Image (spheres, rainbow, N blue to C red):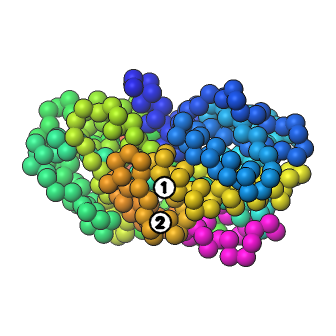
Amino acid sequence: MDLTRRRLLGAAGALALPTFLGGCGGFSTSSGDDDAAGGDTDTLTVTTWGTDSELAGLRAAVARFEGSSGARVALDVVPYEQMFSNVDAQIQAGNPPDVFRVPYYTFGSYAGRGQLLDLSPYLEDGFADRFTPQAWAAVQSDGAPYGVPHHTDTSAILVNTELLGAAGITELPASPEEAWTWDQLAEVATTLRGSLPAEQYPFAVNWQGNGVTRWLSWLFQADGRFLTEDLSGPAIDSAAAREAVAFTQSFFAQGWVPPNSSVQSATYSSDSWYAQTVAMVWGGAFLVPDAEATLDFEWTATYAPRKVRGGSDFGGNALVATAGTPRAELAAAFLASVTEEESMREFCAGASLLPTRTDLVEQGIEFAVRPELSPVFVGQAGVVLPEDSGQVASPDMASIITVLQDALEGAFVGGQDVETTITAMSDGIAAAVR
């Protein structure tokens, strides 16, 4: 697999540059044997993108639903870079798909514009109980569900064990509770900086492009927020945010990360890890199959750090139905079916993604590739709190992303001080949520 493919996978972790992948998963071209959206009024139309393994799991779920319901589903598979321009154009033209896939950080903008179906009248009592609280919070708008959490992903630390071993670091955290504190991470980075040659770096963080939302993990670890509880204004002018900015800013000042790994960089962090430019990288579970197939060094995964508490990004995708669909009941039945235990287990295990069902999280799930790493990613996802994922599902998230990108770029590589950065974030978020 060449660098271009790895770069696409690096974008796939849910939050990449706008012209690349925005959710967990990867590129796919339209499949010739798939039915295009539209047409038959008795056919449910579903638009998605995905890696081959994701599409295999989704097709199996579609077949299961068709077999049990007698309904027909037309699956339209498009490249991610065309996905939302197509959906937006179809919505404007009045002929959208009945169901489509959407990253959680984009979900809020569709729900906030009234473009999604309120599923409340169609879901059975207790339906919410099948999901973890943080997953269910990610598909709420004004207290109502406008989608189902199909899967999630989160960032653990992928480790080049050879480079760490050469620096004398042979023991890694074995649970989220034992994750390195910020101080311990700084000690590890300092040790690696002293061991590695100048052209190699201790780590890289996957906050490039729209992945800037992953910076919020550091804010959450310091027990901070960026939005008020009602999502109506900024809450980032806080001691926690100042600690998060100062600590992440130090990554560049201390030479712990490559200078070209800032949030507006065109170089994805995973590329640096594949090339052994860095010893560790923050990355999603979706990288596991590609890494196992292509890397020629020993590697493993461990938990992301903690401060006041653990905190992590809530990546992945929801499935939503469009407002005004003439097949609302059928769409809701499909959304319920694809989140049944068997369908979700098969999808997540095959695609190296994480379940959103409480029972699957509690039972554990085994990836088809490197199954011993499954508990690391499931455990990492478990530190996400509902109030964390709920903020990222804000209808104003697209504008807030731009605010974070500009402010953090100034802090990381522009010489901007912490106070100026916090003011820029707070003022920008206030303008975004008006």
Q: On the image, numbered disc 2 is attached to which residue?
A: 361
Residue at 77% in and 33% down: 36
- Residue 266 appears in the picture as rendered: no
Please state which of residues 348 and 120 is positioned toward the viewer in this rendering. 348
The C terminus appears in which quarter of the rendering? bottom right
Q: On the image, numbered disc 1 is attached to which residue?
A: 354
Under circle 1, the secondary element is: loop
CB of mark 2 within 8 Å of CB of mark 1?
yes
Residue at 32% in and 43% down: 281
Q: Position of residue 304 (x, y in %)?
A: 33, 56
The N terminus appears in which quarter of the rendering? top left
- Residue 31 appears in the picture as rendered: yes
Query: Which portion, as a residue range, is magenta?
Result: 121-144
Amino acid type, mark 1: Leu
CA gap, disc 2 and disc 1: 8 Å
Q: In the image, is 128 to the left or to the right of 377?
A: right
Amino acid type, mark 2: Val
Q: Position of residue 3 (x, y in %)?
A: 39, 25
The vertical placement of 53 against 432, above or below, is: above
The vertical placement of 308 against 209, above or below, is: below
Under circle 2, the secondary element is: helix
Residue 128 is one of the magenta-drawn residues: yes
Q: Position of residue 351 (x, y in %)?
A: 49, 45
